[in-house]
């Protein structure tokens, strides 16, 4: 599915792909091969290729590296944070990931609209409640909140991963809002 002409990656003029550094061009070619498109969030970072490399490294570490959190749980955090922040790009992209990883399109839609309406295990609910608290009122987070996570079965290292994932998506949501970043059209039809 191609992007309609009236929908661009963001409302700013991006550098031409052929002018990007060879390693970035190669990475984008791999995206084209594996996904069929380059996610607009990556294209948006081409203004500052060193920041794109840092973004990709942090994203890959948070979302793909070994963790006490499953890939699905990390995507769920991305969606909860993005829902609170009303980030259209991330809700669309990571909502598709939740649908795909869970095999449950309804769960993906519930997470986008209101994760509290989803029937989730207590451990996941505690994780998402913490991510929501950290997003909505970070100045209110304290030891009782971490204690609730431990009681639900999360280790201190897991708590770090939950916080790092929520923090990363708060930053990413703000960049998407600042640039009026639009999701790739392909995300809309995935895993439905």
Image: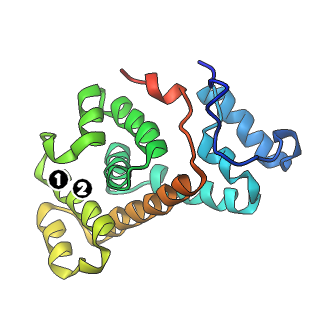
Q: Residue at x 74, y 62 (%)?
A: 50
Residue 184, image x, y percentages: 56, 33
**Badge 1, how many Cα within 10 Å: few under 14, some, many 20+?**
some
Q: Mark 2 = which residue?
A: 128
Give the quadrant of the N terminus: top right
| Residue 68 position by quadrant | bottom left
Display coloring: rainbow
Of the pair 23 and 130, the residue shown nearer to us: 130
Outermost residue on the top side: it is: 1
Q: Secondary structure at mark 2?
A: helix
- Residue 120 visible (yes or no): no
Q: Residue at x 46, y 62 (%)?
A: 168
Find the distance from the CA under tag 2 to the CA under tag 1.
5 Å
Q: Mark 1 = which residue?
A: 125
Q: Tell me if 41 is positioned left or right of 30 in this view.
A: left
Report if the CB atoms under discs 2 and 1 are less than 8 Å apart: yes
């Amino acid at each position: 599915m191609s992007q309609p002409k009236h929908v661009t990656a963001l409302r700013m003029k991006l550098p031409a792909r052929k002018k990007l550094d060879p390693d970035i061009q190669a990475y984008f070619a791999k995206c084209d091969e594996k996904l069929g498109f380059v996610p607009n969030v990556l294209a948006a970072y081409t203004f500052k290729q060193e920041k794109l490399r840092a973004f990709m490294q942090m994203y890959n570490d948070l979302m793909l590296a070994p963790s006490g959190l499953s890939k699905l749980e990390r995507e769920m955090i991305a969606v909860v944070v993005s829902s609170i922040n009303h980030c259209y790009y991330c809700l669309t992209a990571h909502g598709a990931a939740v649908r795909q990883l869970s095999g449950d399109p309804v769960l993906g839609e519930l997470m986008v609209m209101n994760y509290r309406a989803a029937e989730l295990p207590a451990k996941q609910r505690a994780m998402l409640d913490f991510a929501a608290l950290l997003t909505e009122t970070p100045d209110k987070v304290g030891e009782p909140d971490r204690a609730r996570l431990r009681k639900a079965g999360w280790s201190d290292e897991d708590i770090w991963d939950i916080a790092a994932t929520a923090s990363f998506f708060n930053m990413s949501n703000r960049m998407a809002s600042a640039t009026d970043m639009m999701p790739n059209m392909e995300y809309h039809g995935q895993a439905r």
